[in-house]
Amino acid sequence: MMIQLDFEKSGGLIPVIAQDIQTGEVLMLAYMNQAAFDQTLKTKKATYYSRSRKKLWTKGETSGHVQHVKEIRVDCDLDTLVIKVEQAGGAACHKGYKSCFFRMVTDNGLKIVGDPVFDPEKVYK
Amino acid sequence: MMIQLDFEKSGGLIPVIAQDIQTGEVLMLAYMNQAAFDQTLKTKKATYYSRSRKKLWTKGETSGHVQHVKEIRVDCDLDTLVIKVEQAGGAACHKGYKSCFFRMVTDNGLKIVGDPVFDPEKVYK
């Protein structure tokens, strides 16, 4: 069934929050256009639109760290998604951490609170 | 201490994911500019920039449903935040649900999976 999301509000892209379905940890935020959303629905693998590369990007196509989409939630304004995923390889962040949000704001600046899962130099050759 | 976020990539605004610090549930996504971020740091109450009203907006200023900010996480690109909050009133969504993401995508369209916490017509008079 067709679900009409509001892609126009932000120029064709909506923010998508990827959340670990087991732990609830927020892994990353990326963007989808209509084509990325359609491909994600069809393949059940998270596919985003890369704003820097200006093309569709299936998470894990280089690293193998695919996100298997188990549930999709839509917000009240139909312009933001939460996708609940199983994260292959245990890490979503290209810097080797489980979550991209591995740093906490403190009175003394940023403090790393996540543990590294892999070495980016070995994964992204 | 000054933390330099990348507000310029998206025209002065960064997406901010508000997450219930107890349950890990994603409550909502909104945006901050530098002034909203500074005010949030200072007051420890989530303050966003409203794209529709084009001004700062302290969550709960009308409804009383303030978000007390307990922890702030920054992503690898310094352009997205997760704020872990205690949600006053038990609901973040202006439609009366705990989370704005109260609907799930199914093969038969959107299905409501959240429980309503309050009646919007009584809160927003």
Image (cartoon, coloured by chain):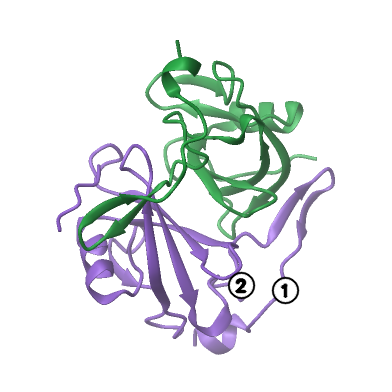
Chain colours: A green, B purple
Residue B26: quarter of image: bottom right
Q: Which residue is mark 2?
A: B98
Residue type at mark 1? Asp
- Expressed as whole percent of the image width and height from the top left, the position of residue A102 reads 42, 46
- Expressed as whole percent of the image width and height from the top left, the position of residue A108 reads 20, 58
B71 to the left or right of A20 = left
Is residue A6 in view from this perspective? yes
Looking at the image, which is closer to me, A119 or B33?
A119
Q: Is residue A39 above or below residue A69?
A: above
Question: What residue is at 57 percent from the left and 52 percent from the top?
Answer: A25
Residue B45: quarter of image: bottom left
Seen from this angle, which residue lies furthest top?
Answer: A125
- Expressed as whole percent of the image width and height from the top left, the position of residue A124 reads 46, 15
Question: What residue is at 20 percent from the left and 61 percent from the top?
Answer: B35
Question: What residue is at 37 percent from the left and 81 percent from the top?
Answer: B61
User: Would you say the residues marked 1 and 2 are in contact, meaning their CB atoms lie under 8 Å apart?
Assistant: yes
| Label 2 element class | loop
Mark on residue B115? 1
Mark on residue B28? none
Looking at the image, which is closer to me, A90 or A68?
A90
Residue type at mark 2? Lys
Is residue A14 in view from this perspective? no
- Badge 1 density bin: few <14, some 14–19, many ≥20, Cα 10 Å: few
B31 to the left or right of A63 = left
Q: Is residue A89 above or below residue B105?
A: above
Question: What residue is at 71 percent from the left and 67 percent from the top?
Answer: B114
Calculate the distance from the C-alpha at mark 1 to the C-alpha at mark 2: 7 Å
Q: Quadrant of the N terminus of chain A?
A: top right
